[in-house]
Image: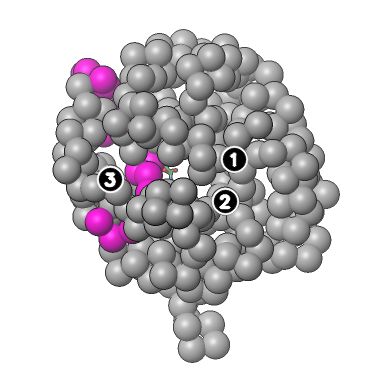
Amino acid sequence: MKLLGDWLRSNSRKSGSRIILAADVGGPLESRLDAATSLVSAVRERIVAVKVNWHLLLPYGVLGLRKLIERCNDAGLPLIADMKLNDIGATNVEAAETLFSNGFDALIANPFVGYKEGIEDLLAKSRVMHKGVILLVYMSHAGAREGYGLKVGGEPLYLGFARKTRSWGADGAVVSSKSLAIIREVRSVLRKEQLILSPGVGFQGGDARNAIAAGSDYLIVGRSVVESKDPLKAVEALNRELGNSGPSPAVRERRSSL
Ligand code: C5P
């Protein structure tokens, strides 16, 4: 039983990487599972984790994804379900139980649903099962500011979500790699062991080095790798780019307290 943060850190040391592969494989539905499984096999030694989204979860479901799940489990890569879960506690718990008892190690949830009878039950379930919950704090698309950036009580919603991530004790937060000031702000709110995972590098315009320098721990990368002719090369190029950027604040503080 490993805590998500410890597991990612240990994988990062082994692989020299900070990349979480978003296995967002497109194309005909029936060929996606094989394509995603081969993709994971190709890059498994140079990434820290795998995230799946609706591209795979919808056509295959948890049982249909068994091959991919086993490939990730065998490779020692945490598997994250990007459901942006946003429902009442009982439904959240049902989803978590299905994912966590079938080889998933963490899920992404939306703090918007609130704590009582929402995220509280989900966090309780994930703790019992020793699994991870990451909360959406700031998304990476252009419209993010209309929701996550909305001013409520004089401050942006994402700041409130960052505080909730801290006080609720989630494993970490998703913050867009394109919003460097927001990464810094969220970093200053979170506990040192809480992770920042940042999507949006490459295709959505985010810069890997800048995101890490601002305080992200890991980058979630999809299309720049998935749609590359040589996914391993694409991952290695990103790893190289980050090679000299040094540990992020969270990692640095954790190390010094060891
Ligand atoms: O292809 P690309 O690298 O842009 O993929 C980013 C992945 O991260 C997608 O699966 C997307 O749904 C997800 N994501 C995101 N922004 C968030 C949370 C998740 O782009 N805030």
Q: Residues within 10 Å of mark 1 (few under 14, many from 20)?
A: few
Q: Earlier in the sequence, mark 3 or mark 1?
A: 1
Of labels 1 and 2, earlier in sequence is 1
Q: Nearer the viewer, residue 58 or 181?
A: 181
Label 3 lies in ligand 1 vicinity (Cβ under 8 Å): yes
Type of the residue with mark 1: Leu
The residue at which mark 3 appears reads as: 201
Visible residue check, residue 88: yes
State the residue in front, 193 or 170: 193
**Which quadrant of the view contains residue 138?**
bottom left
Q: From this viewpoint, is residue 54 visible?
A: no
What residue is shown with label 2? 171
Query: Residue 141: x, y in percent?
Result: 36, 55
> What segment carries the magenta color?
213-232
Badge 3 vs badge 1, beta-carbon distance below 8 Å: no
Residue 34 location, x and y as percent?
Answer: 46, 11
Name the mark nearer the viewer: 1 or 2.
1
Confirm or reject: label 2 Cβ below 8 Å from ligand 1. Answer: no
Seen in the image, is 3 located left or right of residue 63? left
Which dot, 3 or 1, sits closer to the camera? 1
Question: Is residue 203 found left or right of 117 in the rendered image?
Answer: left
Numbered tag placed on residue 3 in the rendering: 1
User: What residue is at 69 percent from the left and 32 percent from the top?
Assistant: 100
Q: Quadrant of the N terminus?
A: top right
State the SS at label 3: loop
Q: Callout 3, which amino acid?
A: Val
Image quadrant where residue 145 sits = bottom left
